[in-house]
Amino acid sequence: MIAVPVQRLAHGTGLALPQPATADSAGMDLLAAVEEPVVLPPGGRALIPTGIALALPKGLEAQVRPRSGLALKHGVTVLNSPGTIDADYRGEVGVILINHGDGPFTVRRGERIAQLVIATLAVATLEEVDSLPESVRGDGGFGSTGTAGGGA
């Protein structure tokens, strides 16, 4: 297990720190640290504060991902999913929520709004070449591998 320093900001006082819900949970719930409820109309979006900042060790990243329950029940998701938090960022973790639902959605203080997943970062460099090696798929784009049932 890797320890990640977390700082609770003043407006995060009284809220639980992110932690896995079960021993095998991949993500940790991020809570809304709003002072007053925020209403997202259909199509609306807002940056929701979480009241925490992280100091990720070098070689790790944090990803902010949607919560499936919010997406299914209300059509609310993370707009830039997954949002990336770099190891050298020390500001507040914020969640950009968007309401794709049919009605307004109210974000209340302490509500679970997203998941935080800590992952190992593969560091790569791009090397320019004149051509790429062949593959089975080749340069086929979106939908080029067919559909379920063998259709095109």
Image (cartoon, rainbow, N blue to C red):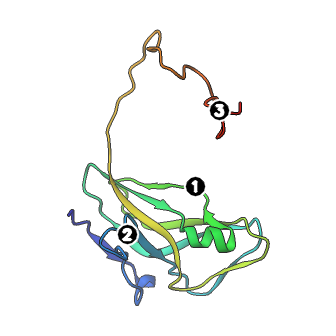
Which badge, 3 or 2, comes first in the chain's sequence?
2
Residue placed under numbered mark 1 in the picture: 80
Using the numbered discs, state the Cα–Cα distance from disc 2 to disc 1 in whole angstroms: 19 Å
Quick check: marks 2 and 1 in contact, CB under 8 Å?
Answer: no
Which badge, 2 or 1, comes first in the chain's sequence?
2
Residue placed under numbered mark 3 in the picture: 146
Quick check: marks 1 and 3 in contact, CB under 8 Å?
Answer: no
The quarter of the picture where the N terminus appears is bottom left
In this rendering, the answer to whether 12 lies above or below 123 is below
Extreme-front residue of the structure: 149
The quarter of the picture where the C terminus appears is top right
The residue sitting at 43% across, 14% down in the picture is 133
Extreme-top residue of the structure: 130
User: Mark 2 falls on what kind of element?
Assistant: strand
Which badge, 1 or 3, comes first in the chain's sequence?
1
The residue sitting at 56% across, 86% down in the picture is 35
- Residue 96 is drawn in which quadrant? bottom right
User: Mark 3 falls on what kind of element?
Assistant: loop
Instruction: Name the residue nearer the viewer: 105 or 151.
Output: 151
Type of the residue with mark 1: Asn
Residue placed under numbered mark 2 in the picture: 53
Type of the residue with mark 3: Gly
Q: Crowdedness of circle 2 by 10 Å Cα count: few (<14), some, many (20+)?
A: some
Label placed on residue 69: none
Relative side of 90 to 149, left or right: left
